[in-house]
Amino acid sequence: MRNQRATTVFGVTAAVAVAVYQFLPDVRWLLTAVQVGIGWASGAAILAGALRMPRRERLPWLCFAAGVLCNSTGIVVAAAADVWFGLVDLPTPADPFFLGLYPAVAGGLAVLIRRRDPRTDRAAFVDAATITTGFGLLAWVYVIAPRNLGDQMDRLAHATQVAYPIGDLLLIALTTRLLRSGGSRGVPFWWITASLAAFLIGDSAWVVLGNMGDAGEALATTPWIARLLESVFLVAFLLFGVAALHPCAREVAAPADARPATLGRGLLALLAGASLIAPAVLAAQTAGGRVTDGWSIAFCSATLFLLVVTRMALLLRQVERQAEQVRELARSDELTGLPNRRAWNDELPRALERARRDGEPVTVAILDLDRFKHYNDTYGHPAGDLLLKSASAAWHGVLRQADVIARYGGEEFVVLLPAAGAEDARRVLDRALAVTPLAQTFSAGLAVWNGRETSDELLQRADAALYAAKEAGRNRVEVAADQLSRVTA
């Protein structure tokens, strides 16, 4: 309850602070103080939330706190460098602080992803690579390449300029991978995702304005537009703090028990959009009358094609695995784990054909737990289910390695005994009768295949022997009396 109150108080206070920021007078140091105060308060909130967690769960939140504190500190460093020293050209003393956000937050995301998905998820990796590759082409064409080709910048300034879009690409990759991870998707998870989205939106807005030339510079210096863009980053700071203070923040790093791989409509649309970026850029440059990034577009297109093919192969493998699991489930009894009637009906004809080919005997037995209905009515259905599971496991343990036992229905089981005549089969079933658990017994009927009869006819004779065992007093094994001379191939 206290944690929820702290989250609410911080969230409301933060929202009011961002709203008030829009109406503050245009005083450089006042605006800087408010921005830095919001950033530091958010970092402190993240640290407070992390300290409430067990020590081993704090690492990703400490990384987030470091990134937010570092980035918000860059605001005051930038203001001081400008006002006191006139340092506005890249690189400025503030750039290391601004750039510190990316490795710190990326490290926290990597830890979260690893803890949520301890096992490697190749499909999620391919999805993240596809989306990052598409946006990487945009970053190259509209941010990195123009700086390299058009501006007379020294190497350090150019490296600083390029580091920002590279950091954004890193966050895009890890955000996509986080969204594809298993584990909890509670409120803190979505606050983190929204914070990352706000950082990316803010950076993208500055890139767009930077590529608009004089018009973009005029817009960027317009007070209300500048305040709005700055507020995007402030909101990003605050969302991290709200996520860390939430009572369910610990669950963000909790591993997933089992999460089937899915390809929802939103993810499919995002993958399709990323895959279409390369042809869209080519179309835009062709319409402009000059293709300036042909090799980059070709490389990106080839990479995206290979990633899509890889994703299709992974999906195909997943479908094949699921189909195999469905086939196995269709042939297994849900309660006992033994083969079910369908699997038995497939196996028995094959066993008879092998016996005909090899000239060996084969025996079939039908087992029926004695007075099972009375046991069920007396002790209840859960106890009856436990008896079925315990009995089937005990019987399976004393059968020969080549024997097959299946659940035929209800309390009735069938046993296939290859290369066994009546006496050998009786000895096996006597062992099974002796290990029947919970002081219960069964009746069984044996029938040795005569070499000519069908599977149904063989089972009918075993079933007749079963009823003979019940009529004789139960708790016994009977051999089919009307045994015919066995004919071998």
Image: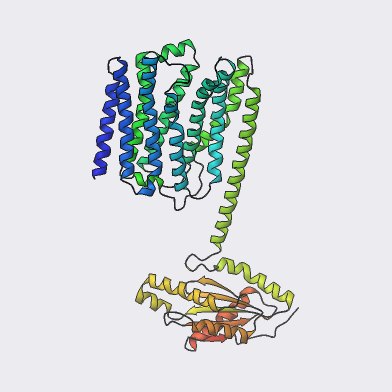
Which image quadrant is residue 298 in? top right
Position of 212 with respect to 191 (left or right) is: right
Q: Is residue 360 visible?
A: yes
Of 283 and 293, nearer the camera is 293
In the rendered view, tell whether residue 20 sits above or below residue 257: above
Task: Name the spot of residue 430 as percent of width and height, x first.
Answer: 54, 85
Quadrant location of the N terminus? Answer: top left
At 61% across and 38% down in the image, what residue appears?
307
- Give the residue at the far front of this rendering: 85
Position of 45 with respect to 460 (left or right) is: left
- Give the residue at the far right of this rendering: 489
Q: How many marks?
A: 0
What is the image's colouring? rainbow
Of 194 and 76, nearer the camera is 76
At 53% across and 22% down in the image, what residue appears?
156
Of 160 and 18, nearer the camera is 160
Position of 255 with respect to 38 (left or right) is: right
Q: Is residue 245 visible?
A: no
At 62% across and 87% down in the image, what residue appears?
423
Task: Name the spot of residue 299 as percent of width and height, x first.
Answer: 64, 29
In the rendered view, tell whether residue 208 sits above or below residue 342: above
Task: Name the spot of residue 409 as percent of width and height, x first.
Answer: 50, 71
Quadrant location of the C terminus? Answer: bottom right
Task: Name the spot of residue 219 as percent of width and height, x first.
Answer: 41, 13
At 70% across and 78% down in the image, what residue appears?
452
Of 339 and 396, nearer the camera is 396
